[in-house]
Image (tube, helix red, strand yellow):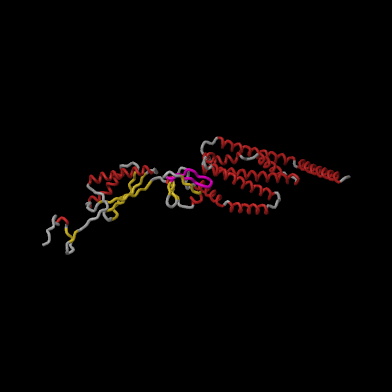
């Protein structure tokens, strides 16, 4: 008998032995196999039903993307391979399958479970990102390119972890692989440090939402005010009030103080004005009530306080504080205008004069005592 014939004969004998072992196991555990198969079929039907339920959640959605839709996407992505292997794993565990069957079943179940977990994790993370950004913006807006990179990074990361877990459970030493991936990741991170810095800044803008597209913000020194037009992977573009487009890297923009005017619900206004020193005390006491009355005639205005707070260089100064119940800048300016016109009209009726910077000169005689200018003769007599 040649060597090749002997090897073929040995393979045949081992195959016959394995078959007899499996047949004996099936014969000895026929009842347990039947019960386990029924349980496995029930589990498979439940998983298939959950998968169909997920498709229905996605199909019947009417509101913007939320956790209900994200959960539906995860269920809809349940694979038939995972469902089958879960059912087979249940049967083999309950019936104490022989090693010749248990080993490949365990290997296939580990592969199916790792891949399925990566798919579920991917759907959950991407769904959460789309929820924060907005589905329309994520699919068709200017953030679509940035989110495309995010999808790629999430997919590669999760499936790399799944492959490492599969190899580890199959008995492969993955220490060197993990170390190599770590060193490679560090090298890539150092080489693309600026890009990743702006990418993480873009993620911060997406999740933390210090501002959104369309918001009016003030930033920088000297301050620049403009409307956010585009939030990209690396830069944010802002249309300044003077008309030009300002391009800022995401990292630099978040490293400085920002004022988001879109978050205003109402505006607080502080106005100061002065009246002349010749105003009688009774008139001074009336000024806060007059200012309140003028403001109360404005539907968007809410009076806070009005006080005479100091003696100025050429006026008695008042401070008036009120709120405008609107976020619109034009509404605030309209209320201020109505207040100024109303105060000018009412003060004219009361004979109260607004102050303006003035200086008064005094005459003194040779003895240093002040002289009333009205007592000075219009024509001085020449000295003898």
Task: From the viewer's perspective, tell me whether residue 311 is left or right of residue 248.
Answer: left
Whether 234 is among the magenta residues is yes
Q: Position of residue 257 (x, y in %)?
A: 45, 52
Residue 128 in view, yes or no: no
Toward which corner of the image does residue 266 lie, by quadrant? top left
Image quarter hosting the N terminus:
top right
Image quarter hosting the C terminus:
bottom left
**Extreme-left residue of the structure:** 384
| Residue plotted at (29% across, 55% down) | 310
Query: Is the stretch drawn in magenta largely helix, strand or loop?
Result: strand
Task: From the viewer's perspective, tell me whether residue 113 is left or right of residue 281.
Answer: right
Q: Which residues are magenta?
A: 226-240
**Extreme-bottom residue of the structure:** 367
| Residue plotted at (57% across, 45% down) | 149
Residue 273 in view, yes or no: yes
Whether 306 is among the magenta residues is no
Q: Position of residue 196 (x, y in %)?
A: 56, 50
Q: Position of residue 117 (x, y in %)?
A: 63, 45
Task: From the viewer's perspective, tell me whether residue 109 is left or right of residue 379.
Answer: right
Q: Nearer the viewer, residue 91 or 343?
A: 343
């Amino acid at each position: 008998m040649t060597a090749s014939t002997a090897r073929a004969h040995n393979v045949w004998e081992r195959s016959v032995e394995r078959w007899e072992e499996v047949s004996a196991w099936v014969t000895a555990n026929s009842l347990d196999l039947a019960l386990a198969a029924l349980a496995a079929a029930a589990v498979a039907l439940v998983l298939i039903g959950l998968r169909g339920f997920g498709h229905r959640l996605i199909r019947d959605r009417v509101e913007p993307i939320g956790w209900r839709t994200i959960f539906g996407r995860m269920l809809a992505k349940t694979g038939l391979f995972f469902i089958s292997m879960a059912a087979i794993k249940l049967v083999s565990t309950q019936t104490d399958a022989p090693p010749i069957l248990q080993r490949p079943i365990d290997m296939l179940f580990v592969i199916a479970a790792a891949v399925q977990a990566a798919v579920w994790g991917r759907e959950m993370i991407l769904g959460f990102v789309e929820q924060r950004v907005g589905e329309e913006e994520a699919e068709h807006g200017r953030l679509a390119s940035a989110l495309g990179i995010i999808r790629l990074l999430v997919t590669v990361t999760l499936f790399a972890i799944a492959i490492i877990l599969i190899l580890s459970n199959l008995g492969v030493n993955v220490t060197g692989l993990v170390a190599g991936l770590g060193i490679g990741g560090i090298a890539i991170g150092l080489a693309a440090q600026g890009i990743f810095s702006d990418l993480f800044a873009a993620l911060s803008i997406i999740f933390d939402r210090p501002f959104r597209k369309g918001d009016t913000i003030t930033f920088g020194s000297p301050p620049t005010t403009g409307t956010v037009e585009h939030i990209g992977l690396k830069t944010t573009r802002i249309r300044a009030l003077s008309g030009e487009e300002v391009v800022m890297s995401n990292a630099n923009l978040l490293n400085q103080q920002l004022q988001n005017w879109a978050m205003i619900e109402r505006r607080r206004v502080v106005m100061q004005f002065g009246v002349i020193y010749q105003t009688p005390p009774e008139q001074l006491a009336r000024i806060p009530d007059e200012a309140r009355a003028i403001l109360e005639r404005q539907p968007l205005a809410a009076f806070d306080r009005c006080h005479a707070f100091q003696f100025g260089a050429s006026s008695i100064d008042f401070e008036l504080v009120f709120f405008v119940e609107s976020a619109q800048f034009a509404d605030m300016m309209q209320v201020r205008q109505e207040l100024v016109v109303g105060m000018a009209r009412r003060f004219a009726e009361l004979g109260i004069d607004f102050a303006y910077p003035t200086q008064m000169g005094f005459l003194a005689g040779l003895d240093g005592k002040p002289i009333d200018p009205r007592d000075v003769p219009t024509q001085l007599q020449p000295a003898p």
